[in-house]
Image: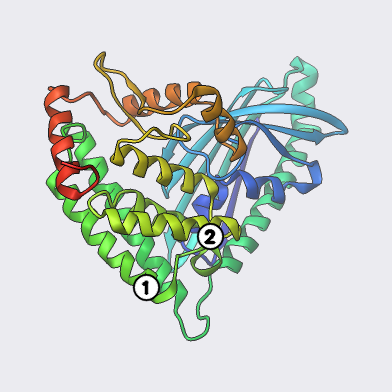
Amino acid sequence: MPIIALETTIAAPIAVCFDLARNIDFHQVSAGKTRERAVGGVTSGLISLGETVTFEATHFGVRQRLTSIISAYNRPNYFRDEMVKGAFSFIRHDHWFEEKEGLTVMRDRFEFESPFGILGQLANWLVLTNYLKRFISERNMALKREAESIVKPIDNGMNYHRIAQQIIGMEKADQELRSRLAQSGQLSEGYHKAMERLHNEHAQTLEGIIDNIGYPTIGKVGTAASEAAWLIIQHAIGQPDFMRKCQKLLEQAVQEKQADPKNLAYLTDRIAVLEGSPQLYGTQFDWDESGELKPNRFDDLDRVNQRRASIGLNSLEEQTAVMARRARNDNESPPMDLKKRNREMDEWRKSMGWITP
């Protein structure tokens, strides 16, 4: 089985490189020669663990489709995509990212098998290996150029690079705490005090940044830091005024194409659920009485799926399956006493001002 191994050194933060490598929109731009187009699964923005994407592209003069799944994921150091349907017998692509002396080293390991038996083995070595190596190398060079171009050291006296690193650092601390709580089985038992404290601290810090530079858009701090800022806002559930303020700022950033519309959908739904209103996009999930992860209340399935498709999300039915797999992978389980947890969360929402006592 042929193996293609490549290494690319990039003068940009590791999170920037990682997120570009899983960015559906960037992939379509960087693979312009083959007219790549996402036509199924996640069709825009960032793809994550358990999610699929179907690309339509032209290779060797033939228009064809290939569906892949993100089967392993550890942001910002590693992810794997594997073919689940397509012209090849087998494709597996491992992506590693490592920080080294202020740079990011990106390593690719691409394994494949053509579908044509003995003739296919000759094709592997004589044609496909060189073709695919060139294809991946060109994509990596495009990623390097993009990553290095979006890191702005100084703009009008404002050190956006430092601010971006600060935001990304907060996101990393958030994810590390979440991982520890999940591994110890404490993630589903209400809002953990350590997590609440960290979320409030991060919200206060980010609010200071926003008061200084405005919303952290892609143009100001880069894709990775803009995504990290959204995650901090998404988790700031103890700060209703801050979340609503950021929702309005994010709406404007999306209109100016300086933020991902999917992030706005997630934030809009998060606020709706906290307020006790139906979701518009069905992005928020919780455990039901049967011990399964299901979407929180939404208005209408057909309309929800139409809205999801309009911003490049998969269907709600597909996402429900993704969430179930992700919960298993993250060692998440239903709370021991769901009714008690729900009563406590309702009281907490009242105390925070999300709902009327």
Q: Nearer the viewer, residue 329 or 171?
A: 171
Point out which mark residue 339 bears: none
Residue found at the very far front of the displayed protein: 356
The relative height of residue 254 versus residue 111 in the rendered view (above or below) is below
Say left or right for 160 vs 334.
right
Quarter of image, res 40: top right
Task: Look at the image and tell me whether residue 14 can be seen.
Answer: no
Quarter of image, res 43: top right
Q: Local crowd at mark 1 within 10 Å, few (<14), some, or many (≥20)?
A: few
Residue at image mark 2: 253
Residue at image point 55% right, 55% down = 254
Point out which mark residue 211 bears: 1
Instruction: Please identify the quadrant where the C terminus is shown.
Output: top left
Q: Nearer the viewer, residue 138 or 179?
A: 179
Residue found at the very far right of the displayed protein: 61
Instruction: Please identify the quadrant where the N terminus is shown.
Output: top right
Residue at image point 51% right, 51% down = 19
Tag 1: residue type?
Asp
Say left or right for 243 vs 28.
left
Q: Is mark 1 on a helix, strand or loop?
A: helix
Q: Nearer the viewer, residue 339 or 178?
A: 339
Closer to the N terminus: mark 2 or mark 1? 1
How far apart are labels 2 and 1 at the CA level?
Answer: 15 Å
Task: Look at the image and tell me whether residue 71 can be seen.
Answer: yes
How are the colours assigned in the image?
rainbow
The relative height of residue 49 versus residue 102 in the rendered view (above or below) is above
Residue at image point 37% right, 27% down = 297
Q: Local crowd at mark 2 within 10 Å, few (<14), some, or many (≥20)?
A: many
Tag 2: residue type?
Ala
Pinpoint residue 269: horizontal percent, then vertical percent: 40, 40
Pinpoint residue 216: horizontal percent, then vertical percent: 45, 65
Residue at image point 53% right, 56% down = 259
